[in-house]
Image: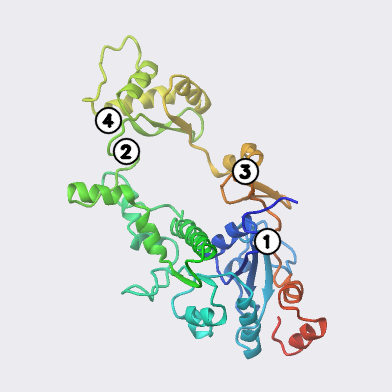
Amino acid sequence: MTTTALDGVTVLDFGWVWSAPLVAAMLGDLGADVIKLESRTRLEPNRLRRTDRDSGDDPGMTSFAYFRLINRNKRSVTVDLKHPQGIGVVEELVRVSDIVIDNFTPGVMDRIGLGPERLLELNEHVITLSLSAAGAGGPHSALKGYGASISSLGGMEALSGYETGEVVGTLGANISDPSAAAYGVLSVLASLVAQRRGTSTGTWIDLSQTEAVAASLGEAFGYLMVTGSPPTPRGNAHPVFFPHGMYRCSGDDRWIAVAARDASERARLRSVVVPASDSMSLDNSESTGTWDMYVSAWTGARSREQAVDELRAAGVPCAPVRDGAEVVADQALVDRGVVAIVNGDRVPLAPWKLSGTPVRCRLPAPGIGEHTDEVLAELLGYSEERRAELRELEVLE
């Protein structure tokens, strides 16, 4: 049987929507047993979403593709957290868990009796990761943020626009969620390593999604330190490299990205895009506008694929600007094992290639409460009679 990196690690996932559920999913990709704790009285929002292509009954509430992608490798347990015995069940799960994850506003977990201090009382070794919008302390701690509001507070949105100064924004990319998730996985794994070295016991990780965005703006911070002025939107331009941008090719909305980083790459680019008969000399002193004129004229007369082939043959860094459908259909991602095909879905996994402990998808996203009996019997030793009693009391939903 294939060994995974996190065999024997149990994760209790309270997460909603994207950031915390993505942390749990990536830990699941690495082999952790992820228990998605849910309540039918207050459902995960992504279980309720539908698209035009969704139809018919969906008792498991997994028809929304976004939910299926973010909740792979998880088992679902449904408990009424408003019932005193429901909290008792969850407390028992905490005692046998290694990691607890949530992305609620600070104070929510405390109000249900499962704040960081209580979790550490229940299990002195538990690693608790809280991914709130702006952290548990400071003037923004009560922020109930989502997507663009968090990346705006973190400084990202002000950089996304054109040189005219008009802010465009990140066009729905919601970069705060995956940024925070990446830092969240790193912090959890570091805490596990510290535990196994005997230098740490239980840990509460207070991770602000806003601060995760700010920590990703390295170049912007560098510009501010050097110039003393905040960076402004530059469109597709780069502060040092030129030409640098997206250039239209022939065909319907077909584009190519080109980046020349130094004089030698510009010389190779010039040999391809500037007609031999043209006497204009393009060197480091020429304007980026002149370069853009030549590159645009050249790419506009070629298909995207032809332009990529010719520039790569000349040693010029470039790539096709692919849309989502092209990326999803890329068989190379499946062949490399970073995309799994699960029940007809192409599911992106954590993009790590580990030779000894490969990342893999072991379970599709769970139906609501699909594994309640299985998990309570396996992890807590609950008998069938005990589970029936809890259902009679409406503790298990």
Nearer to us: label 4 or label 3: 3
- First-in-chain label (4 vs 3): 4
10 or 237, which is in the foreground?
10
**Alpha carbons under labels 1 and 4: distance apart:** 49 Å
**Alpha carbons under labels 4 and 3: distance apart:** 44 Å
- First-in-chain label (1 vs 2): 2
**Alpha carbons under labels 2 and 4: distance apart:** 9 Å
Examine the rendering and report whether any part of residue 216 can be seen: yes
- First-in-chain label (3 vs 1): 3
Nearer to us: label 3 or label 1: 3
Q: Say few, some or many: other residues with alpha carbon within 10 Å of mark 1 (under 14 / 14 to 19 / 20 or more).
A: many
Q: Residue at x 50, y 73 (%)?
A: 202
Residue holding disc 1? 365
Residue 294 image offset from top left, x and y in percent: 34, 23
**Mark 2 element type:** loop
Q: Residue at x 63, y 89 (%)?
A: 83
Which numbered circle lies on residue 355? 3
Which numbered circle lies on residue 288? 4
Residue 381 image offset from top left, x and y in percent: 75, 78
Examine the rendering and report whether any part of residue 165 can be seen: no
111 or 43, which is in the foreground?
111
| Residue contact at pointers 3 and 2, CB within 8 angstroms | no
**Mark 1 element type:** loop
Residue holding disc 2? 237
**Alpha carbons under labels 3 and 1: distance apart:** 25 Å
Q: Say few, some or many: other residues with alpha carbon within 10 Å of mark 2 (under 14 / 14 to 19 / 20 or more).
A: some
| Badge 2 amino acid | Ala
Give the number of marks. Answer: 4
- First-in-chain label (2 vs 4): 2
Q: Is residue 7 above or below residue 370?
A: above
